[in-house]
Amino acid sequence: MIRSTSMRAAAVLLAVLVAGCGATPTPSSPTSPSSPAVEEGRRLVTKPTAPTDGTLLEPATGFGSRPPAWLGTRELPKTSSGYGEVRPTPPVLRNRRWTLPDTVPTRPGRGFKAKVVSPAPARVIARSSWVDGCPVAATDLAWLRLTFWGFDAQRHTGELLVHRAAADDIVSVFRTLYRERFPQEQVGIVRSYDPDAPATGDGNGTGSFVCRPSTGATYFSQHAYGLAIDVNTFQNPYLKGDVVLPELAGSYLRRDVVRPGMIVDAGPVVEAFARIGWEWGGDWNQSKDYQHFSRNGL
């Protein structure tokens, strides 16, 4: 069992980023997928605040609240797919609105701040998932420390490892997300990749570099090059057939019920990545990867 909040936060971020996204897409117009895993749930009363695509947002239920004590600790049984068993979204996670503790010191000053160190220091690479045999050289990875807006309406600081060729573009994206007050739960570096690690199905976070294959494939994911980013993985799950990642995020497959932290078509997140030429997994046809953005569209 994870004994501290900061350790649990890191484990929750790791659990979903190493499991999600990267399947081969066929682009199409986004749809609201129909799946047995989609949970109808209770639609909350809406109010006209900060619409991004003409859809009204739900009220700030749970604003600034603490995560449940069991977050990241309850293991799911594995299925024949190799992933955890898909289960209904617990009520406390249906309108998820908290920000976990920052994993790096706060950037000084006010507003958006970012610092790029390229190549990333050896000590940072050592606490990432990079190992010999990864498809990108460690010297081609850049270390980003940047501020982001939390669900608690406060300024937070996170870190990313990205390909150094994309570092400045990624900073521009996060500058836009900060200006738009797009909330994120945690921004961090995935520390290891273990495909056999137990699934809890409740992870959430924003991250980039993970040295792993694409979901359901044997070739490397774009994450393994530092050329893909997942944003708020629980609010923006992955769906292909009966596979939902994170496994407890089925409520968020209802894309017509827009809640804070969700990425919507023509919204600020999609537009910010489009300006740097990155494509969105929410536009895929054979699967939907609402959290995923990549340089080559895969």
Image (cartoon, grey):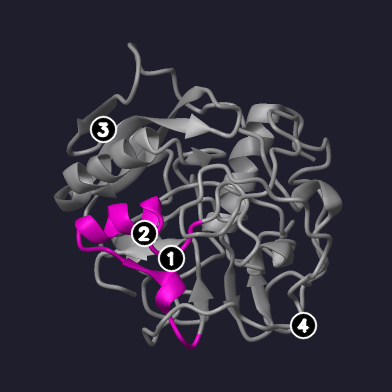
Nearer the observer, disc 3 or disc 2? 2
Which residue position holds label 4? 36
> Would residue 128 appear left or right of 186 to someone viewing this image?
left
- Give the mark nearer the N terminus: 2 vs 4: 4
Distance between the alpha carbons at the discs numbered 2 and 1: 7 Å
Circle 4: element type: loop
Q: Judge by depth and name the residue closer to the eye, 206 or 8.
A: 206
The extreme left residue here reads 165
Circle 1: element type: loop
Nearer the observer, disc 1 or disc 4? 1
Q: Give the magenta-colored segment's residue range.
A: 263-286
Q: Judge by depth and name the residue closer to the eye, 292 or 6.
A: 292
Q: Looking at the figure, which quarter contains the C terminus?
A: bottom left
Which residue position holds label 2? 270
Residue 151 seen in this snapshot: yes
- Verify whether residue 279 appears in magenta: yes
Q: Which mark is residue 38?
A: none
Q: Are marks 1 and 4 in contact (CB under 8 Å)?
A: no
- Give the mark nearer the N terminus: 2 vs 1: 1
Distance between the alpha carbons at the discs numbered 2 and 4: 27 Å
**What amino acid does circle 4 point to?**
Pro
Q: Which mark is residue 121?
A: 3
Which of the 4 image quadrants contains residue 200? bottom right
- Give the mark nearer the N terminus: 1 vs 4: 4
Name which residue lies at 60% across and 55% down: 235
Residue 208: where, in percent of width, then height?
A: 39, 52
- Give the mark nearer the N terminus: 4 vs 3: 4
